[in-house]
Image (cartoon, grey):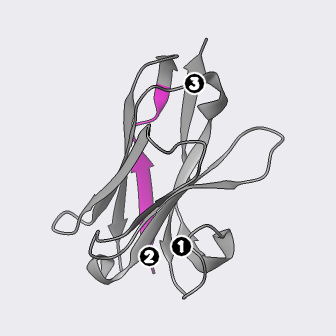
Amino acid sequence: QVQLVESGGGLVQAGGSLRLSCAASGRTFSRSAMGWFRQAPGKEREFVAGISSTSISTFYADSVKGRFTISRDNAKNTVYLQMNSLKPEDTAVYSCAVKTNSGSYYSGRSYDYWGQGTQVTVSS
C-alpha cells in the first residue's frame, strides 16, 4: 500500500508564501512521477503541478506558473510545493498523488494513491 501524508498548509495573507510537503511510503518513490492538485469548496479538483521521477520535467497550471515551484527529494521520499505570491483564489485543499500511468500530468485520471490533503487559506 502507498501512503501519502501532506503537511505545511495554513492561513496566510495575500502575497505571502507557504511550502507544502508530501511524504510517501510503501512504494518505490524514486521511480514515480508525482503531482499536486487542489480543490476549493464547490469546485472541481484541479491540477496544480507535476514532476517526473528524476525531476527533469515539471508541469504547472497556468494559474500558478511563475508563483509555485514543485520539487522532490528522492532520498527523503518527499515532494514539495513552494507557493509564493499567494492569492485568495489559491485557497483550497491541496493533495499530492502518485502518477501511475502514461496519461497526461494534467489529468487526475493519471494518478492513484492520493493523500488526505492539507488546507491552504489565503486572506485578502
Mark 1 or mark 2, which is nearer the start of the sequence? 2
Residue 113, numbered circle = 1
- Where residue 101 appears, x then y in whole percent? 55, 87
Contact between labelled residues 1 and 2, with CB atoms less than 8 Å apart: yes
Q: Quadrant of the N terminus?
A: bottom left
- Where residue 93 appears, x then y in whole percent? 61, 42
Which residue position is annotated with label 2? Answer: 2
In the rendered image of this protein, does residue 49 appear above or below residue 68?
A: below
Q: Residue at x 58, y 52 (%)?
A: 61
In the rendered image of this protein, does residue 59 appear above or below residue 103?
A: above
Contact between labelled residues 2 and 3, with CB atoms less than 8 Å apart: no
- Where residue 87 appears, x then y in whole percent? 57, 24
Which residue position is annotated with label 3? Answer: 87
Q: Quadrant of the C terminus?
A: top right
Q: Nearer the viewer, residue 54 or 62?
A: 62
Q: Nearer the viewer, residue 94 or 115?
A: 94
Nearer the observer: mark 3 or 2; the answer is 3
Q: Main secondary structure of the magenta part?
A: strand
Q: Amino acid at mark 1?
A: Tyr
* Callout 3 secondary element: loop
Q: Callout 2 environment at 10 Å: few (<14), some (14 to 19), or many (20+)?
A: some
Q: CA distance from mark 2 to mark 1?
A: 6 Å
